[in-house]
Image (cartoon, helix red, strand yellow):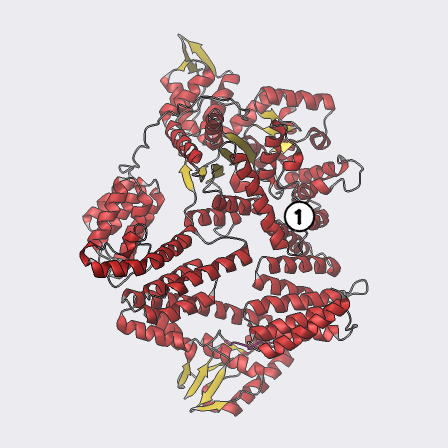
Amino acid sequence: MLKLSFLSSPTVELNNTAIEIESRKGLALLAYLTVTGQSHSRDALSTLLWPDHGQSQARSYLRHTLWSLKKGLGEEWLAVSREQVELNPEAAIWLDVNVFLEDTTAVAAPDTEDLTRLAEAVELYRDDFLAGFTLPDTPDFDEWQFFQTEALRQKLAGALERLVWGYSHQGNYETAIPYGRRWVALDPLHEPAQRHLMQLYSEAGQKAAALRQYEEYAALIEKELGLSPQEETTTLYEAIKAKRIVEPFLKANKLLSPSKSKGIDHQAGGQKVSFLPTSSSKFDRQTVLKQADQHRDSANYGAAIDLLNRLLARNPTDEPTHRELMHLYVLAGRRHESLRQYQTCLEALAADGTSPDAATEALYRQIMSGQVTPPPAPKPKPVGLPPTPIAVEMEHSTPLAGRREELTLLQKRIQAARQGQGCTLLLAGEAGVGKTRLAYEALRLAATARTSTLIGAAYEEEGHLPYQPFIEAFDRYLAEQHLPPEQHPITHYQPLGASDLQLEHSALFKATATFLVTLADDAPVVLLLDDLHAADEASLSLFHYLARQTRSTPIVLLATYRTDLVASPASPFERLLSALYREQISEVFHLNRLSEQDGTQIITYVLGGDAEPTLLKSITDLAEGNPFCTQEITQAMLKADHLIQEAGQWRMKSGITLSVSAELQELLRGRMHRLGRTIEPTLTAAAIIGREFQFPVLRAVADLPDSELLDALDVALRGHLLDETETGYRFHHSLIRHTLYNSLSQARRAWLHTRVAQAIETTSGAQPNRLQPHVESLAFHYNLSNQRDQALPYLIQAGHKALDIYALEMAVGYFEQALNLMDELALADPGQRWHILLQLASCSHILANARKGVAYAEQALALEPTENWQPASHEKIYLYLEAAFLLITSGDMNPAQSFLELAQLEVGEIDENRVEYADLLYYVALWHWHRDEYVQAYDIAHRCLEVAQKLNV
């Protein structure tokens, strides 16, 4: 038998005798053929293992490698033809990877027998796939090995989790603990695993170990990410700590009076906090259903849904539970998930060879036909607090229609902040549905109740400025309160002077939180960020931080975002929403379209009188419940003289018909045409600039005489297409700008973006660094222009600007855009590429993204020198050491050693009395330390200290 063990440092045994494969390429070929389990062409294998050689030479190397394998193992293991190579399918070959995958896949819901099988599978996984094995200059093989390793690690994590749950369910906590430790070791920042291990220690009576586990994790996440553990983890910690303090007393008390002892869970401060099933707490179906009914009766649909999903996990064919979930999703306003639950039910029943019963089909039809609908929201309650007016920015709009219930709920949450109950509130809905209008009304009422209000906004389809919505909100507040700009926590942040950018990044966040907390000392604070979905990644990170840090302060974070935009689940904004939901630190208000009655209220207000039913029906059908569209359509018809008032009622003139909502854009453009011939070209040019724009830039782009341009702007202001700001103008609503922007051809957009960028350059004055405030906008516009190469220097400058204020994610975004631009335009500038990759590697180090950091370093080091450029020696050493450090911290010691050796070769060509030599010694010592070679680590670290002291560094 041929026995291959690849879940460790690779070993090969033939009939219980270890076999040494002579060449690394031979071992790689054997591993690839065995794990893939299929036939491969000689050309494909040659390219995989010898990519830098011609096809003829590569095939020659392959022939020699196959001959060497046959010589070492024997002829019977390989099936080789003229064009194809594979392992002999009839041969007796044992592969630990296959056994591991078969056993972990087969065991889904482990019982006692299956747990043993799963534990045996986990024991096979002694180390990562082909641990310590690397193949230089074979990127395709490296990529295959990497993805195999990641997939197997995920399988291991899942198996360890099932072992933890399985043994815990049996009450066998001591057996579960080693698997919990190993699960945590796979990813120490995976918080659910940390909680499970804490619970295991607690249930096993090792409460000191449970508390120590929390403290170690809290220190780790603070060091690595500048964050605190989630509330769920902290709650478990406090419960274990309380239980440990009172348990000795309770044991003694129970001996004296067993009948009166209520038990540790009650004495320690309430209900027991548990994340694992215990042998004494059976998962009873009737109990779960009773709890779900209680949550449903109190309108806590999310909690009921979570309970029933746990029930389904144990019995996927429980059809009544599927039906109840379908109903709950509808009640929670999540109709799409209700329909998806029906599909899940069908699939589970089909797998069991059955079909849904009549009750399930009937409920599905009722949901599809709209017969099952969410319940009405609670009736509003007045605030009743004395008014104290403060300045709150309000858009000119119709009275708030159809949002009284949502407004009341917002007021209640804001009032709760007065008792120190901070919260994060999100208003979600499609464009034009009234999110901003509702938020502004909530702020107006909060202002009358002696609440400090701050307003900022992010803007779509514009170059992102780091922390832009926060900067806008703080700028406006300080100006309104006549406070010095030096109090601004972001633009006037005073760096610590630390060399660790992550530390500075964390300090800036803390300074922002301190600014808001200080404001809240005098009165509760409501901070509104409008269009959060369009915010830069740095702002999203800061928003998440504030949401976590201000929950026990009288601070309310209020934000709006659009739900009609297609976004990847991996986008920064979607990740933020997932984190807020997972950590249960936000409340989302989903705004639906208005009813016909509410739309009628808007129409009546715009017309200034009643309208006949036919007119109301035409407009409400066309607007489809969108408040902004309702208002715009009514105003357009009124100004187009399509309406006439007779007998106290407005009606449409004869021959006028409006039938489909697709006419909205034409109505908006028709409205602009009627305002004058220069209105549409003026606003089209403005739409390219952005939601907000300044006159000098518009003048350079619009190519109109100043008098005509100013006349056009005056008309647009009077027509409520634009609003005036302190520095220029702003589109009254984003839909107006979208209509204009989307009406342009791609070629014309590119031409106009070029003109905008050039206008910004020419209107920024002649002072030194005059373009520094505009580099993000210039990068954005040039990247969409027909002169895209001009965006490159601005993207790099924007990246450095983001680094200066520790917006690391934003910096990475700009540098990656620059790199992609060079690739797309085939810009051959290795010096520029080297600089960009150097910055990306550095940022990846700070953001703890080892895989990307190593990849960037390798890309940079692979660049060929030219006559005009070659990398500086100290920069090459920096990249070698950077890659080595990232690999060391990831536990990839052999690749790290390779980079350290390359750094040593480079250092050997310079004076050992330079600082790079001390750096090398430091990382070599670190490498030995991570390998538990403490004597070598100490000796080299001591030598490093001597060199550093000599150099005075």
Counting other residues with Cα less than 10 Å from the Cα at mark 1, is it few (<14), some (14-19), or many (20 or more)?
Answer: some
Say which quadrant the C terminus sits in: bottom right
Taking 835 as reference, is 928 above or below it? Answer: below
Can the viewer see residue 410 in this picture? yes
In the image, 821: left or right of 4?
A: right
Q: In front: 680, or 737?
A: 737
Q: How many marks?
A: 1
In the image, 118: left or right of 23?
A: left
Question: Mark 1 belongs to which amino acid?
Answer: Pro
Asked if the stretch drawn in magenta spans residue 133, the answer is yes
Of all residues shown, which one is farthest toward the top?
Answer: 647
In the image, 878: left or right of 319?
A: right
Q: In front: 88, or 805?
A: 805
Q: Secondary structure at mark 1?
A: loop
The picture places residue 14, in percent across and down from the top left corner, at 45, 90
In the image, 81: left or right of 345?
A: right
Q: Quadrant of residue 44?
A: bottom right
The picture places residue 704, in percent across and down from the top left corner, at 72, 26
Q: Main secondary structure of the magenta part?
A: loop
Q: Residue at x 63, y 73 (%)?
A: 925
Can the viewer see residue 346 in this picture? no
The picture places residue 673, in percent across and down from the top left corner, at 59, 23
Of all residues shown, which one is farthest toward the front?
Answer: 256
Segment colored magenta: 130-136
Say which quadrant the N terminus sits in: bottom left
Residue that numbered label 1 is attached to = 495
Asked if the stretch drawn in magenta spans residue 93, the answer is no
The picture places residue 526, in percent across and down from the top left corner, at 50, 34
Q: Residue at x 61, y 43 (%)?
A: 464
